[in-house]
Structure formats: structure tokens, C-alpha cells
Image (spheres, rainbow, N blue to C red):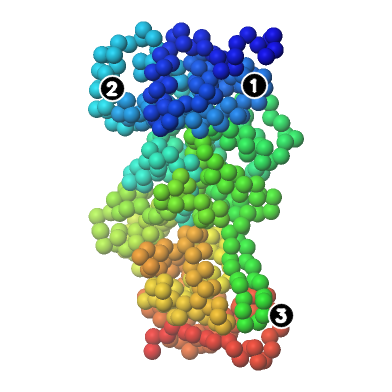
Amino acid sequence: MSAGISQPPDEEFMEADKNWELDKLYLDLASAKHKALTPVEKKLLRGLLCGCSPAEIAKRVYHSRNSNTVRVYLSNGIYKYIEDTLSQQLGYSVKLKNWSHVTHLLENAGYKKNFWSEQQVNSLIKHSSQQKKLVFRDECKTVIDWGEAVDVSNFYGRKTELNTISEWILQQDCRLVAILAMGGIGKTAFSVKLAQEIQDQFEYVIWRSLHLTPSIDILLTDLMQILSPNIEIDETITLNQRISQLIDRLRQVRCLLILDDFNSILENHNSAIKTNYSQFNQRSEIKYFSGYTGYSELIQRIGNCQHQSCLLITSREKPPELTEIEGEKLPVRSFNLTGLDINDCLSILEDKGLNTSDYTDINILIDIYGGNPQCLKLVATTIKNLFAGNIYQFLEHRNIIFGSIRRLLYQQFHRLSKLEKYILYWLVMNPAITDVFTVSSHILPVSFPKIGSRLILEILEVLQQKSYIQIKSAKILITEVWKHYIMEYLQEKELYSVTQTHYNLSITDPHFKSQLIKDLHEIIIQELDISQISSSTNSEFRVKLAVDE
């Protein structure tokens, strides 16, 4: 032992014994751990009780400026033992947000010498056990950076959805949650409203939109400047190191981070791999735009690494990483946001000045737009301005896809591959075909041997991930607004007979059948990138039309 060391390493921070009931604390934390604390854990605990930060403990014990090891030890051990011990004693959930909370919590729990009598402690426990389960908050104000978050003073409904996601984050400790839905359904407003409702449970709330597609480097710099304003940003370190810095900070503090409009950095990638002509493996995949794959690493790391914060994203399409790491009982989950219920839709229409006394017309209008709040607001303005507020006259006009609603749907629809579009065409024109188990045998437009059924199921899964369809109890559901949009689109392309009504979607027109077969033939060739097809191979095409004879 060198002359410079005045006490054995295991005796570091023993001055804590003067003020704290160490033996009792060791015993109680060991009970939470289910085995005795290690000498290292006791040493780190004493350091915290002496008021030392993780960085100060690392410098004093390990003579190092790098506190990562100490922070990980604390997050994965001591902090959890303290949380479990105090939660058991007090009867509600206790969460440690920062090392500085340790002494405050333990002092209130009676572990500081001469602080409370045993009778006072028991009285506190009895009183606290009657309280509702809650998350501990210290007296410091939450640091909130809303960025360009929208105003949600006129927010409609979503109480059930808000309660569900709040429980995921606060009670079930989800660290990554994706809110998925088609455009206009209110994902952005929902994320802001949710953050407002639970902001007091976090030390930091940061809301950012990816609409202008910031690079991952710009985003990480922005976040670290908020979370660690006194630390100089090193632009020379690797992306993995920068993400590690962020996650380390997410372990130290409790942060709610929202990334809105995540689909802005996603693209649809269509691949066709040819092994021989009769066997193809074709998928339509959701991938990141070139230069944005760093977000994939960020998503995976935040979802897989242990920390006390939560990343919430909103998107029209599910990021590809989520499928592998999400689950109902896992800390990574996704939630499909659907249309508003009828009462909330009525509130929107009434606020826009429409008379909602005729429930028949109102129900039809709400059903057509699937409770989509943005569509309802847009159509309400048109009904007010052009039809003197008369909903019946608007419905009689039959042009329900127009203006901003049409642009909204167009932007989403044309992100689909050609095969995905054609699957939607067939689903819309054949409403009786809804069973996932039999759909491929009915709506397969052009079938190559051995790949048809698999290809159809893959496309259905992608369409569900992109929020174009819903599959419930193995039944395929398409909203009315998409049905109308697709029928109008087919009419414009002269692929849908103008003699058909909006309510008779069966294929009965011979001209349409002939034209569709021809177009499908050409589209499949283009989609699979087949430059030449021999006459013998061409004879293998099989066309199956779901026709109501």
C-alpha cells in the first residue's frame, strides 16, 4: 500500500456512518436485492450518502474522470434497490430521477440518525399506504422545450388512449412507444397533449418534429445541449459514441423525448430478387432515406438499453426496427391511433358551426371520413361555405374527396408500391373478401407459381404497418374515405367503369376486366423488373378475378 493512501479502499466514505443507519440500510437493500450487497455497492452507496456525485465518486475511488462505470453500477443496482425498498415501505411507486435524490428519499424514510422515531416512521408508512400509486417528483421544476409543438387548447377526446399510453410510460416503464396512424388522425396533437398531462413526472420534456428532416448529428447535438448544457459537445466522436452519451444521460435523468412526424425520414423500398423465372422473392420494405440510417441505430439503442427515460415517436409508418423489439409485455410498444368516437366528432362539427341535430346525415359523414379529425374540420368548412351548412346536400353531391383532403390522401397513397396499390384496388372493389386466410386465393391479380400467397400476405402486413388497413380477428378493414379515394382514382385512370355506382363494387364490366388484366400484366412485369418474357413463360400467367357472376 502506498504512503499516499490513508485508508483501505473498502473503508472509503466511512464518514457516512456518522449520520446514517448503515447497517439497517445494508440489510433492507439486501432484502430488495435478495442477497447481500457487495463491498463495491456498499462503497458507492456511502459515497452517495456523503453527497458525492457519480463523477466525484469515480475520481475519489478510481482516480478517473470517466464516471460511466459508476453510473451504470448505480443505475443497475443501488438505485433499483432503493426504489424497491421505499416502494415496499411507502405503498406507492418511488422512482429515482437523479443521484441527488438519494439522501432526500432515505432521510424521509428514516434512515438518517436521530431524524424520526420508529413510531413516526410507522405512522408515515400507514398513511402513505392509503395513497394512490404515483411516481415520485422532487421539488425542482421540469425543464420543458416544446420546439414547434402545436397548440392543443382545442383538443378533442382521446381519454382512453391517453390513459393507456400514460400507464405504459409511468407505471410499466416503457422506454420506447410508437404512435401510428394515417395522416390527419391527430398524432401530433395527441403527442403534445400526452406530454402536457405527464410532464410533471419528468425532469426534462423535449418535443421535436422531424418534418424538416434534421440529420441525426443535428438532433443529437440539440438534445445534448438541453440535457447537458455545461458539457462541451465533441463533434469528432463517432455516431455510436454520441448515442452512448445520450443514453448515459437518459439514465441519469428522467426525460420524455418526443419525435413527431418520424415518417419524414422513411421511404418505401421495393426489391425484387430473381432466382429463376418461376420463383421470386419480392418485398415492399420501409427503410430510411439515404443519410438517415443513424436514426435506426438510435431507435434500437434506446429500445434495447436500460434507462429511466422514454422516447415517443409518431409516424404514419412503423419504423422497421420496432417489429423485432416490440411486444405487449415488453418495454417497447406501438399503438395504432384510430378515428375519434362519435361524440368527439360531433364536438368538432359543432365548433365549426354545423347543425348536428340530424343524426342520420351526421353518422354518414363521420363514417365516410372514419372519424378523422382533420378531414372532418376540412369538410365542415366546405359544407359551411358552399352548402350553407346543409350536410344532406353535401352528401347528395357525392364529391367527398376534394381539395386538402385529396392532397392529404394523395401524398400517402403515392408512397405505395404498384403492387400494394393493386392489392388495395382489389380489396375495395370486392368488399366481401375480408378473410386474411383466404384472401390470396380470391384477389391474386397475376400469379407466378409458388409465390402468390406469400407475396399477398407480405403486402397485407406492410399495408397494416403503414396504416392503410386494419386487421382485427383476421378480418381486413378499410376505412370509407380510402374506399372512395381509390374508386375515384380508378375512374380517373379509366380502370373503373363509370357505369358502376359507388355502392356496387363488383367487377361486372367486360371492358374493365379486359383493361385491368392488361394493366396488371404490364405492372407486374415493371414491378419485378423483367425485361424479356418468353412466350412459354408468359403462358404461365394465371389471372384470377373475383367476379360476382
Badge 3, how many Cα within 10 Å: few under 14, some, many 20+?
A: few
Label for residue 531?
Answer: 3
> Is label 3 in a helix, a strand or a loop?
loop
In this figure, which residue is indicated by the disc labeled 1?
62
Tell which residue pokes out farthest to the front in this image.
Answer: 1
Which quadrant of the structure image shows residue 547?
Answer: bottom left
Is residue 230 shown above or below 511?
A: above
**Do tag 3 and tag 2 residues touch (Cβ < 8 Å)?**
no
x, y percentage for residue 92? 32, 30
Instruction: Give whichever of discs 1 and 3 has the lower sequence position.
Output: 1
The answer to whether any part of residue 144 appears in the image is: no
Seen at 71% across and 83% down, the residue is 532
Q: Tell me the CA gap for discs 1 and 3.
A: 67 Å
Left or right: 314 with respect to 158? right
- Nearest the eye: 436 or 342: 436
Q: Is residue 270 visible?
A: yes
Q: Amino acid at mark 3?
A: Ser
Q: Residue at x 63, y 88 (%)?
A: 538
Residue at the image position 32 percent from the left and 25 percent from the top:
89
Residue 173 - label: none
Amino acid under disc 2: Ile
Question: Residue 44: x, y in percent?
Answer: 53, 21
Quarter of the figure with the N terminus:
top right
Local crowd size for mark 1, using a 10 Å CA cut-off: few (<14), some (14–19), many (≥20): some
Looking at the image, tell me whether mark 3 or mark 2 is earlier in sequence order.
2
Element under disc 2: helix
What count of labels does the image hold?
Answer: 3
Amino acid at pointer 1? Tyr
Q: Earlier in the sequence, mark 1 or mark 2?
A: 1
Quadrant holding the C terminus: bottom left
The image shows residue 428 at horizontal and vertical percentages of: 43, 73
User: For mark 2, what is the residue?
Assistant: 125
